[in-house]
């Protein structure tokens, strides 16, 4: 755009500065969407719902356009054990680029070690702190 055209558009109010944090600025910079999900329920149906939600978001926005992280603690940690009934669903999510993070404090309380857990998951010391930090970083919080 030429300087003359920019000046003319500014004069009639059609060209304005876009604050860096706005959705329009993010679209212009093609910033990725970011979601952090909290799963604390040990029921397989809740897990299927959470993983389905994550895959639906990827389908809608495009897998390469969104970062999804599922933070797991409390009774839900059972669903990340090797013998979990939702293990195949978790493996599919991991293969699709969805990050699954287990709380080591919960694992400690249940006397679990990393060797007891599904392959490919990540670990954090405290699940709640991870949720807090991700929200501070601009992730959208979802609890299915």
Image (tube, rainbow, N blue to C red):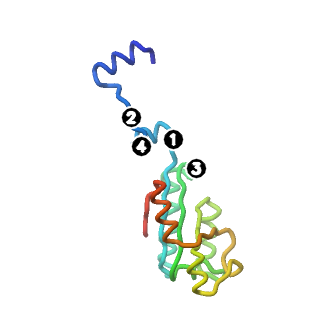
N-terminal-most mark, 3 or 1? 1
Q: CA distance from mark 4 to mark 3?
A: 21 Å
Q: CA distance from mark 4 to mark 1?
A: 12 Å
Q: CA distance from mark 4 to mark 2?
A: 8 Å
Foreground label between 4 and 3: 4
Depth check: give the residue in front, 20 or 115: 20
Q: Are marks 4 and 1 in contact (CB under 8 Å)?
A: no
Residue 56 spot, x, y in % from top left = 49, 60
Q: Which residue is mark 4?
A: 21
The answer to which quarter of the image holds residue 24 is top left
Answer above or below: position of 102 versus 133: below
Answer above or below: position of 114 versus 64: below
Residue 22 spot, x, y in % from top left = 39, 42
Depth check: give the residue in front, 40 or 104: 104
Label 1 CA crowd tier, 10 Å (few <14, some 14–19, many 20+): few
> Disc 3 on helix, strand or loop?
helix
The answer to which quarter of the image holds residue 116 is bottom right
User: As drawn, is 12 to the left or to the right of 25?
Assistant: left
Q: Are marks 3 and 2 in contact (CB under 8 Å)?
A: no
> Disc 4 on helix, strand or loop?
loop
Residue sitting at x 61%, y 81%: 84
Q: Which residue is mark 3?
A: 64
Q: Which mark is residue 30?
A: 1
Foreground label between 2 and 1: 2
Q: CA distance from mark 3 to mark 2?
A: 25 Å
Q: Which residue is mark 2?
A: 18
Residue sitting at x 46%, y 40%: 27
Residue sitting at x 35%, y 28%: 16
Label 2 CA crowd tier, 10 Å (few <14, some 14–19, many 20+): few
Foreground label between 3 and 1: 1
Q: CA distance from mark 2 to mark 1?
A: 14 Å
> Disc 2 on helix, strand or loop?
loop
């Amino acid at each position: 755009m030429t300087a003359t055209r920019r000046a003319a558009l500014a004069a009639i109010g059609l060209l304005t500065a876009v604050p860096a944090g706005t959705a329009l600025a993010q679209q212009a910079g093609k910033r990725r969407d970011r979601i952090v999900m909290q799963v604390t329920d040990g029921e397989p149906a809740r897990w299927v719902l959470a993983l389905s939600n994550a895959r639906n978001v990827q389908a809608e926005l495009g897998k390469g356009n969104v970062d999804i992280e599922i933070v797991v603690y409390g009774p839900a940690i059972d669903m990340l054990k090797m013998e979990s009934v939702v293990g195949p669903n978790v493996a599919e999510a991991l293969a699709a680029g969805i990050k699954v993070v287990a709380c080591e404090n919960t694992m400690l309380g249940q006397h679990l070690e990393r060797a007891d857990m599904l392959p490919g998951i990540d670990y954090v010391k405290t699940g709640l702190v991870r949720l807090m930090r991700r929200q501070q970083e601009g992730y959208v919080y979802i609890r299915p």
